[in-house]
Amino acid sequence: MTPDPTGASEETPGKSRFDDIYNEPDPRPYFRRLQPFEYEIPHQAQNVFRRVLAERARAPGAEGPVTVLDLCCSYGVNAALLNHDLTLADLYAHYTSPEAGSLTSAELIERDKEFYASRRRSDAVPVVGLDAADRAVRYAQAVGLLDAAFAENLERHPPSDRLRRTLADVDLITVTGGIGYITHTTFDALMSGTTPGRVWVSAFALRMVSYDAIAETLAGHGLATVSDPSQVYPQRLFTGPDEQRNAIEQLRLTGHDPAGLESEGRYYTLLYESRPRRT
């Protein structure tokens, strides 16, 4: 969920940036800033990821719990929703409350350890987090949302040895934000370290962002990608008319019709599912 802090992607021109909230010591600024724009894609993804997780656990050759790598994991929101009896609305309420606002980051971390531990699901699975935002992933690991955390930018550097070793055990890669800021380069680096034929990918991407290069890269690693263009998932409200105009222009350039969707005032995403080709 964290864009590259070094600059805007060419694939998301005109999109408002929230760089100042993505690498704070804790997620309170993130939730306070995004709540007015009804940022909801983690909520949309919650049941999707749980469904895919169950399918991956039943796949031929599956052994033990499924290990998830959440790409662009930020503060561990997807891990929180996947492994705990919580909704995104619960997280907004938790982090924007007066009680949370009165705490130091260190105090909030101690509070959140108990908050998440008391809501942990019995079917929780290991989650590895990867994001360029080092303070965000440190928070997510400190409160128990991530079993392993990596602050690495694979657009610019190859995976560390520690990340490569971890990738060998990954079964499912998830992402709800970041496509367009991260590209096929990141996916190629990830897939090069995984066990062949093992990893599935479930990714949400804005309709105005092409997924073609990523799908082609995944195909080179033996994965076939499908997406249903009739099934869309809301992401957030536009920050204003300029962002909406830019989004609609990009949609038309890529052949998508904004009528009834982006024309009504918010971003929408598509879900891309990639699984090993059957031989």
Image: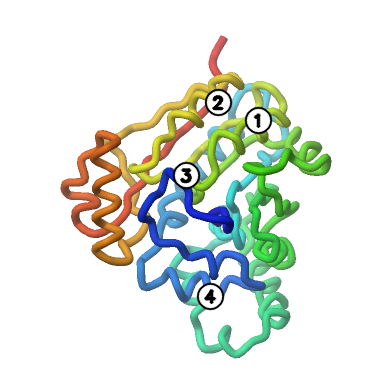
Quick one: label 2, few (<14), some, or many (20+) residues within 10 Å?
A: some
* Element at label 2: helix
Q: What residue is shown with label 2?
A: 217
Question: Disc 2, disc 1: CB below 8 Å?
Answer: yes
Amino acid under disc 2: Thr
Asked whether the beta carbons under mark 4 and mark 2 sit within 8 Å of each other, the answer is no
Which amino acid type is shown beneath numbered disc 1? Answer: Met
Instruction: Tell me the quadrant of the picture where the C terminus can be found.
Output: top right
In the image, 165 versus 155, the foreground residue is 155
> What amino acid is at disc 3?
Gly
Density class for disc 4 (Cα within 10 Å; few <14, some 14-19, many ≥20) is some
The numbered dot on residue 180 is 3
Secondary structure, mark 4, is: helix
Dot 1 falls on a residue whose secondary structure is: helix
Using the numbered discs, state the Cα–Cα distance from disc 2 to disc 3 in whole angstroms.
Answer: 15 Å
**193 relative position to 178: left or right:** right
Within 10 Å of the Cα at label 3, are there few (<14), some (14-19), or many (20+) other Cα atoms?
A: many
Q: Is residue 19 above or below residue 209?
A: below
Report which quarter residue 20 is drawn in: bottom right
Closer to the camera: disc 3 or disc 4?
3
The residue type indicated by label 4 comes to Pro
Residues at marks 2 and 1, CA–CA distance in whole angstroms:
9 Å
Q: In 3D space, how far apart are the residues under numbered discs 3 and 1 (Cα atoms)?
A: 18 Å
Please state which of the two labelled residues, at mark 2 or mark 1, is closer to the viewer.
2
